[in-house]
């Protein structure tokens, strides 16, 4: 695994040649004349294990940025400074030009092949630099993420995040865990909170959390995915990270562009390390050995996209439409039983955490004849399946929940 991530200068020429070959093969995928005419585009969304199309509706049941991205054409090979263009376009959008320019000596930025590469690289970065051998992660977290930590010999402990009696955010105990952990601990925080719980901190809670991190010199590892699907604006969803950087807190940023732009196989995401010190500190050492694994076509696409204000506005508009749709679905699921299913309206984004016991989830599976785990993917629901699911959830919510029996979410990816 280390060999995969470490820089191997002798193989760079072959990697670049292979990337250009890949670029020519996928060129036809992006040079579509009018992708919006197809109701089942090949550029299906990343979120969710399955995508459901409603035959009664013309539009895709989940946002597709094909209308704003896939008309891009590559007439010339990527230039030598493509990595710099990629970095500048991404960070200027999410951080703002002023904050981006102020990070000259505090920032290390690495284009990567995807979120899995981000997690591997960040784990190795923590281990090889002796920063910490253990990280604290929210419960629940993705099993794949936990597996990545184990592979890289990073131990993990859960910190309290969700109240399983109500399904609401358990901020008081979360903050208590941040204070009880040793100084200079590393905490994983999901931003904007869409996956896997649909829960996110408000501005006051973020300020309390950042205050604790400043006092105890904690490191924050942000998993930024599905940006734009909470508020309808990627820049707004990114605001907690900007505030963290302004407060000079050491942080690691895993930016998942594939889930945010809803383009699986894009092959271009980013990992950034930001030091709390204005001068380049030991916290930034070691990143130069990690391979730049992002695909050339993915970097070119993202650079062109985030540099085009019109296309960004179209993307934000599509995200806004989906945010309204998710809110409508949550309201329909709670219809007739708002007290027992209030957790659905408190959560945001395309995912909903079901605070039911394993036994109750098993009963749901038997009743529905469908695999239902602890994470509900709202993007896969249609007008035909909503009433059926609402009836199942309401019948389950009316019974008592077990506080000690946590839900199963083994199929979450």
Image: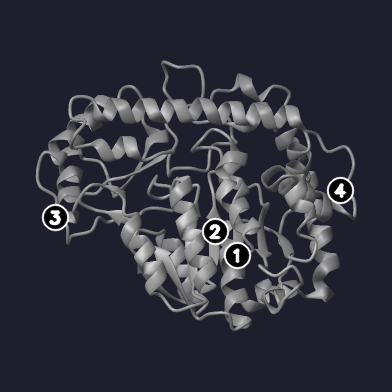
Residue 46 in the image: x percent, y percent? 52, 43
Q: Residue at x 70, y 79 (%)?
A: 282
Task: Say left or right for 163 vs 281.
Answer: left
Mark 4 sits on what residue? 78
Give how far apart the Cα atoms at labels 4 and 1 are.
Answer: 31 Å
Res 316 visible: yes
Q: Residue at x 23, y 58 (%)?
A: 406
Looking at marks 3 and 4 on the same chain, the residue that comes earlier in the sequence is marked by 4
Quadrant location of the N terminus in the rendered image:
bottom right
- Badge 2 marks a residue whose secondary structure is strand
Give how far apart the Cα atoms at labels 2 and 4 are.
Answer: 30 Å
Mark 3 sits on what residue? 402
Mark 2 sits on what residue? 222
Looking at marks 2 and 3 on the same chain, the residue that comes earlier in the sequence is marked by 2
Residue 59 in the image: x percent, y percent? 51, 20
Along the viewing direction, whichever of 59 and 378 lies nearer the viewer: 378
Task: Say left or right for 13 vs 284.
Answer: right
Mark 1 sits on what residue? 251
Give how far apart the Cα atoms at labels 3 and 4 are.
Answer: 56 Å
Residue 247 in the image: x percent, y percent? 62, 59
Along the viewing direction, whichever of 88 and 6 lies nearer the viewer: 88
Give how far apart the Cα atoms at labels 1 and 3 are.
Answer: 36 Å
């Amino acid at each position: 695994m280390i060999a995969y991530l470490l820089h191997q200068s002798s193989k760079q020429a072959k990697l670049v040649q292979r990337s250009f070959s890949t670029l020519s093969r996928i060129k036809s995928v992006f040079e579509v004349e009018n992708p919006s005419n197809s109701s089942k585009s090949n550029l299906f969304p990343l979120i969710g294990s399955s995508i459901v199309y409603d035959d009664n509706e013309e539009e895709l049941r989940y946002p597709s940025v094909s209308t704003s991205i896939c008309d891009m054409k590559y007439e010339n090979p990527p230039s030598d400074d493509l990595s710099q263009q990629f970095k500048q376009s991404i960070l200027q959008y999410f951080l703002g030009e002023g904050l981006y320019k102020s990070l000259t000596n505090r920032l290390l930025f690495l284009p990567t092949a995807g979120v899995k590469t981000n997690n591997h690289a960040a784990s190795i970065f923590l281990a090889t630099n002796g920063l910490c051998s253990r990280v604290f992660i929210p419960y629940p977290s993705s099993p794949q993420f936990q597996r990545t930590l184990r592979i890289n010999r990073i131990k993990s402990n859960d910190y309290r995040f969700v109240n399983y009696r109500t399904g609401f955010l358990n901020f008081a105990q979360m903050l208590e865990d941040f204070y009880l952990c040793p100084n200079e601990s590393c905490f994983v925080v999901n931003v904007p909170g869409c996956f896997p719980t649909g829960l996110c901190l408000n501005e006051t809670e973020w300020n309390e959390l950042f205050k604790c991190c400043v006092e105890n010199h904690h490191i924050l590892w942000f998993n930024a995915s599905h940006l734009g699907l909470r508020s309808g604006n990627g820049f707004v969803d990114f605001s907690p990270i900007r505030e963290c950087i302004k407060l000079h807190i050491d942080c690691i940023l895993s930016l998942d562009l594939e889930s945010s732009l809803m383009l699986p196989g894009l092959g271009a995401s980013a990992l950034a390390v930001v030091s709390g010190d204005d001068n380049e500190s030991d916290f930034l050492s070691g990143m130069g050995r990690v391979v730049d694994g992002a695909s050339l076509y993915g970097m070119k696409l993202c650079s062109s996209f985030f540099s085009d204000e019109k296309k960004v506005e179209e993307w934000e508009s599509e995200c806004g439409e989906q945010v309204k749709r998710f809110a409508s679905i949550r309201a329909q699921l709670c219809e007739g039983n708002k007290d027992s299913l209030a957790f659905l309206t408190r959560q945001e984004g395309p995912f909903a955490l079901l605070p039911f016991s394993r036994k109750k989830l098993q009963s749901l599976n038997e009743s529905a004849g469908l695999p239902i785990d602890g994470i509900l993917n709202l993007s896969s629901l249609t007008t035909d399946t909503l009433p059926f699911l609402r009836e199942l959830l309401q019948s389950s919510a009316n019974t008592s929940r077990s506080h000690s029996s946590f839900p199963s979410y083994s199929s979450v990816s």
